[in-house]
Image: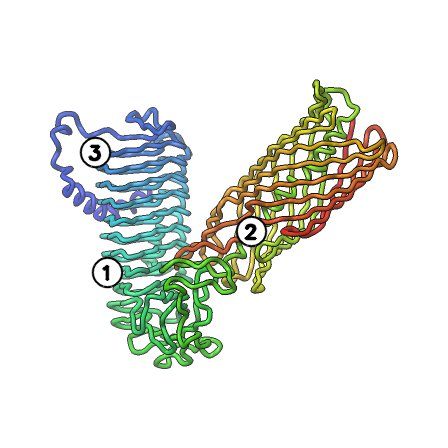
Amino acid sequence: MKFLAKMKEKQMQKRLGGALFGLLCAGVLVVPSAWAASGPPPNFYGTADGIGTTDVAYSVTHDGKVSLAAGSYYEIYGGYNDDDPGQRVYKNQITITDATIAFYAYGGYSENGNADENTVSISGSTVNGEVYGGKGYEECSGNTVIVNNSTINGEINGSYSENGIAKDNKVSISGGSTVNYVYGGYADKGSVNNTVNIQDSTINGEVYGGYSVDGNSESNTVNISGSEILADVYGGYTENDGAIAEKIQNNKVIFKNGAKIKGDVYGGYDKLSKANITNNTLEVVGKDNEAKSIQNFDKLNFFITKDLIANDTMLKVTDTALINNAEIKAGVELGTKLNENDKINLITAGALKAENITTGTLTDGLINIDKGIKVAIGHDGNKLVGVINGTTPPGGGGTTPPGGGGTTPPGGGGTTPPGGGGTTPPGGGGTTPGAGSLYADADAKSPVETQSAAFTMLNLGHDLLTTAGYENAALAVDGEEEGSVNPFITMSANNQKLDTGSHVDLKAWNMNLGFAKKINNNSGKLIIAPVIEYGRGSYDSYLDNGTHGDGDAHFWGAGLMAKQLNDDGLYYEGSLRAGRMSTDYQSAVAGGIKYDSDATYYAAHLGMGKVVQLNDKDTLDYYGKLFYTRQQGDKVTVGTGATYYFDATTSLRTRLGARYTHQLSEKNAFYAGLAWQHEFDGESNAIVATTLGSASAPAPSMKGDTGIMELGWRVNNSDKFELGLGVNGSIGKQKGVGFNLSLNFSF
């Protein structure tokens, strides 16, 4: 195959050199006596039970697992396929601990199909060959390689596609590991959105966020923290056969915590110089980072951490820093001790090429950048310098930041963290972090408000089911034969204002379609009904600082409800529900972000009450209910490149109330009710992570009390059709009004 031929030509010496070196170091070439007598150890393959097998006939293609420890092994496969055309190998997992692998480790291997969502975890081990999250002929996506405190004498590939694309793969290396070469994704047709994270480790050879032979290489990330790279680093790389011009764009390279790169650093690279290399970004966090040279970056962002002092250097370039025509921004971490007109060396270089640069202030919008501090940026000889709240760039290079360089921070420079660690978020949002920690900007709360809107919609669906839904189910079977199934429909529309510490305006409607069945018993009758539910709504979130976000949400699910109605008026009820909630969000936060999220939900309730007959026309129903709703968490990436990790959201509510009903006539009835509701939880938590770090976002909460009033009317115009109309109002944590419509049909 064309791809394999190219690979052999390009990589053979590299791979053989690394592998042979590793083999020699490990003593593998000196055949142990056990091997001499019986041959090398067998291959291992994942199995559904996680035990693993040495017989390839029992290997699996999906959901396989194998765990190896304290021994020597040959080749390891989490999932395996070598002959079935188009066979996908997916969701397999390898765990290797304190072991030695002679040759290869594959999370998933497919000779003729895709390799997706496989994972390789290696700790305290040595691999003398290569490691692949997934290797396949077609697309390879969502694979993960995690290496901690280990030696990999070959290369690591998040994924390797022989005839497709590699996308959404991830490689994480940490804990003093040593690796020869690293590829987030390697593919023939394109490498997209792959990530390499290297922390406190050493890489002997090149590092590629994404590598493509003939296709695009875009949106890949290389994040290097406190590590040493002995060769070149590429955000995106395209081999390119010269036939077409490929796109190498939107790639990112990040240096932080004293990263040392002995080779050249490229945002994007095309071997034949025919590609469209654009919009690649270099981010530098903190001081004492180094590189031989930097080039092919259109954007450079510098995050000045609070441990920097005047004249510190963030990035030392020993050769050439080629940043002509680049957009350069700098921002300062909250709690800095820097004073007005203090200088920071953003770059010191052997040669600085910085013509036609544009400059500005970095506004992450999610992590704790001090928005009151501007950084004037310019070049001074072979230095790129940032001046804290300066009004004129040094050396006359670059452009003056808008607003003349900002304002002087209180006290003459920076803000002092209370108690020596962290700062209190403006406006009281969030909590005070400990020393040296990050916290999210107040605006980071806005994307989390989606979770409050979503679970409130689910609770409104729960309320509809356990009020009008139960009432309709009882009416649907009233007078019907035991065992007959009778449909009912219940709908509601609500306009709510949610007090979340800020507030959310929610407009939503819900629907239940159920089929009620009556079973007579000695105490009275049991009503059971399977239900299908659907809800849709829109919301607007408003923070106290005026930040606005909005979005839509919808859910669907199914459940089962049951209610025992005793002849003496006592009743018991319960329900179970499950389904899927989908939400979206958009706002101008951090220059404009948006996301889509999907999560599973579960809900249940228990209740009991008693209907007391006051006279021939009047009854009083008093009750108590307990509601539980849980929406699972999700991980979403927003437009800034930040990632939100939403925790599961849980609602636990009690409701105590009473309803008075007056029979106006044989076919008409009026009711009115009052209830008190208490929410015990209702907090939406999330971690927001950017290249600057991660922190807990300010958490909206629905914990508290709500008062509810209801009015309604029911009419039975015929033996086959019943109609109910109701209105409710609420005050407290939830404020607003709702309407419901009930329809029952008998056949």
Helix, strand or loop at mark 2: loop
Residue 134 screen position, x and y as percent: 36, 40
Q: Quadrant of residue 416?
A: bottom left
Residue 180 screen position, x and y as percent: 24, 49
Q: Quadrant of the N terminus?
A: top left
For the residue pair 676 and 286, the one nearer the viewer reads as 676
Can you identify the residue that label 1 sits on? 262
Task: Please name the colour scheme applied to the rendered image.
Answer: rainbow
Name the residue rendered at 36%, 67% in the picture.
304
Task: In the rendered view, tell whether residue 47 sits above or below residue 228.
Answer: above
Can you identify the residue that label 2 sits on? 701
Q: Amino acid at mark 3?
A: Ser
Badge nearest the viewer, 2 or 1:
2
Residue 504 screen position, x and y as percent: 61, 55
Q: Amino acid at mark 2?
A: Ser
Give whichever of discs 3 and 2 has the lower sequence position: 3
Badge 2: few (under 14), some or many (20 or more) residues near its Cα, within 10 Å? many
Task: In the rendered view, tell whether residue 41 sits above or below residue 671.
Answer: above
Residue 174 located left or right of residue 190: left
Give how far apart the Cα atoms at labels 2 and 1 are. 49 Å
Can you identify the residue that label 3 sits on? 72
Badge nearest the viewer, 3 or 1:
3
Give how far apart the Cα atoms at labels 3 and 1 are. 34 Å
